[in-house]
Image (tube, grey):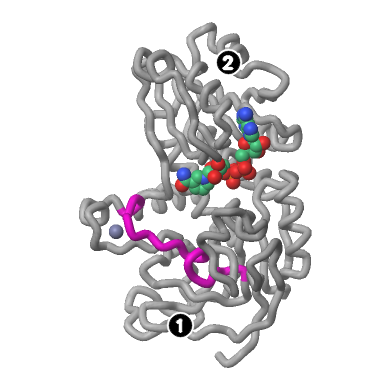
Amino acid sequence: MGEKMQAIMKTKPAYGAELVEVDVPKPGPGEVLIKVLATSICGTDLHIYEWNEWAQSRIKPPQIMGHEVAGEVVEVGPGVDTLEVGDYISAETHIVCGKCYACKHNRYHVCQNTKIFGVDTDGVFAHYAIVPARNAWKNPKNMPPEYATLQEPLGNAVDTVLAGPIAGRSTLITGAGPLGLLGIAVAKASGAYPVIVSEPSDFRRKLAKKVGADYVVNPFEEDPVEVVMSITDGAGVEVFLEFSGAPKALEQGLRAVTPGGRVSLLGLFPREVTIDFNNLIIFKALEIHGITGRHLWETWYTVSSLIQSGKLNLDPIITHKYRGFDKFEEAFELMRAGKTGKVVFFPHKG
Ligand code: NAD
Ligand code: ZN
């Protein structure tokens, strides 16, 4: 295109990022160029912004940040026959090898050679971005970009909530950060009842209620296990969904789930966790799932259909919308302070 664009770039191995002007990139073989219509901030972007230990070991500045996206294809690279100019797409962020043992078993979500779009490559916090064609997901034209960009994290939430039966089942969700909030929306749309949410932040407990949680509890003030037992007549919940990454929440959830119940774990713990396996897992005969990424591409179909059903209550989760990137630092700082649900940028001001 030979034009310039704005991008939020990790320019230095240090805290923060910069809004820079760079050339609009050219799609190479197997790639497309998209006009970014909406893009949202993920916890991973925050880690890159903060330059935590993980980011230091993984990210090689200078690099454009961001990976959650909705955009329109404006240029198609050589050899791409699956997409054309005008297609409206989002992107799966796991770039899988297709050759390893896991991939050969159609377990692409655990590909052993996974590269992450926007982490190991330039990302989408820009006016235009390159997307590998095989990672593109076509959206229906009438899906609002602010929902379409949420599909990638919604995929995490869908894989967690729908890893087992949920309709009509009592459910405990620990952690109402952006992913936990999406989990509440999916659980409610899928007929879970009652949905009990444990979350220490007042702001996020209020959001959880708005999204549809039937009960909320502050685990720093009340024991969530006692709350669950009183709501469920001492039975415990059928389903425990962990979205916080807090070791204490894991233990409380394992106590609160009914014997024979289901546990799906998405939150990542900051360190090794000690658990009474005999009493909290084995003698309770729990069904436990580790959740990572999204199933390719089954989960994308489910996510897209759930959005199109109109049953997902996403609006309260999108707490901040920005036109352009001028205030990106404010957005990151608010998110760092836990004062947001999902933050969405619409890069083009017009
Ligand atoms: P987040 O940090 O914004 O949200 C975590 C929430 O948990 C916060 O609101 C926090 O107040 C709450 N919390 C803290 N201590 C708690 C406790 N004791 N009990 C209940 N809640 C507590 O993170 P997020 O972006 O919403 O992501 C959720 C988790 O999912 C993170 O751990 C993240 O690393 C993980 N994650 C996993 C995958 C995967 O593929 N497995 C993908 C993305 C994110
Ligand atoms: Zn692979």
Query: How far from the left and from the top, in percent, is residue 105?
Result: 22, 51
Does the magenta portion include 121? yes
The residue to which callout 1 is attached is: 27
Q: Ligand 2 within 8 A of label 1's CB?
A: no
Tell me which corner region of the image, top left, top right, bottom left or bottom right, holds residue 172. Answer: top right
CA–CA distance between discs 1 and 2?
53 Å
State ligand 2's quadrant. Answer: bottom left
Left/right placement of residue 80 relative to residue 200 reads left
Q: Main secondary structure of the magenta part?
A: loop
The image's mark for residue 225 is 2
Magenta-drawn segment: 108-125
Query: How far from the left and from the top, in percent, is residue 286?
Result: 37, 21
- Rendered residue at 36%/85% (across/down): 78
* Amino acid type shown at disc 2: Val
Does the magenta portion include 68? no
* Amino acid type shown at disc 1: Pro
Whether the residues at callouts 1 and 2 have beta carbons within 8 Å, the answer is no
Residue 313 in sight from this viewpoint: no
Query: How far from the left and from the top, in percent, is residue 15?
Result: 70, 61
Question: 70 or 243, which is in the foreground?
Answer: 243
Q: Residues within 10 Å of mark 2 (few under 14, many from 20)?
A: many
Give whichever of discs 1 and 2 has the lower sequence position.
1
Question: 185 or 248, which is in the foreground?
Answer: 248
SS at circle 2: helix
- Rendered residue at 22%/54% (across/down): 101
SS at circle 1: loop
Question: 1 or 86, which is in the foreground?
Answer: 1
Left/right placement of residue 86 relative to residue 216 reads left
